[in-house]
Image (cartoon, rainbow, N blue to C red):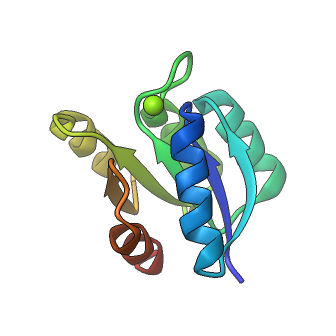
Amino acid sequence: MKSVLIVDDSRTSRRLLKDILEKAGYEVVGEAINGQEGFDLFVKLSPDIVTMDITMPQVDGLESLKLIRKQNPDAKVIMITAAGQKEKMMEAVKLGAAEFITKPFLEESVLSAIRHC
Ligand SMILES: [Mg+2]
């Protein structure tokens, strides 16, 4: 069973993602509400996959992605994006993002992104 760390400042988004992932048999090992907490939990929990919201207060998803990939160049990080974030998506590709999921979440696109990791 693959382990997943969810990083998102929205409680609703975290709950939706967690429901979709657990129903599909993934183990959600942690949840973080900003990029710093996400990085700290990544180091502590070594999850197989991270889902990373881009827009978060304090340390955002791009900065957290950068920290995580520096810590582990093989880390699988799926970025959660919203409409109109093309530039940030391109930045995330450069920083080594594995996949993208667009809000609002569709079960099939979430699971497809996770399977591709
Ligand atoms: Mg957000």
User: Camera-side residue: 62 or 16?
Assistant: 16
Position of residue 16 in the picture relative to residue 87 (left or right): right
Q: Is residue 95 visible?
A: no
Q: Is residue 48 above or below residue 92?
A: below
In the image, residue 27 lies at what x, y percent?
72, 71
Q: Which of the image's four quarters has the N terminus?
A: bottom right
Q: In this view, does 101 lie to the left or right of 65?
A: left
Q: Residue at the right extreme?
A: 44
> Could you say where residue 47 lies in the image, as x and y percent from the top left?
71, 62
Q: Position of residue 78 (x, y in %)?
A: 45, 57
In this orientation, which residue lies closer to the viewer: 86 or 70?
A: 86
Q: Up-down: is 47 above or below 25?
A: above
Based on the displayed image, in which of its 4 quarters is residue 10 positioned?
top right
Total numbered labels: 0
Q: Quadrant of ligand 1?
A: top left
Q: Residue at x 45, y 80 (%)?
A: 115
Q: Is residue 56 above or below residue 103?
A: above
Image point (39%, 70%), residue name: 113
Does any portion of residue 86 appear in the rendered image? yes
Q: Image point 76% across, 44% down: which residue? A: 41
Question: Which residue is painted at 55% across and 22% down in the image?
Answer: 59
User: Which image quarter: residue 109?
Assistant: bottom left
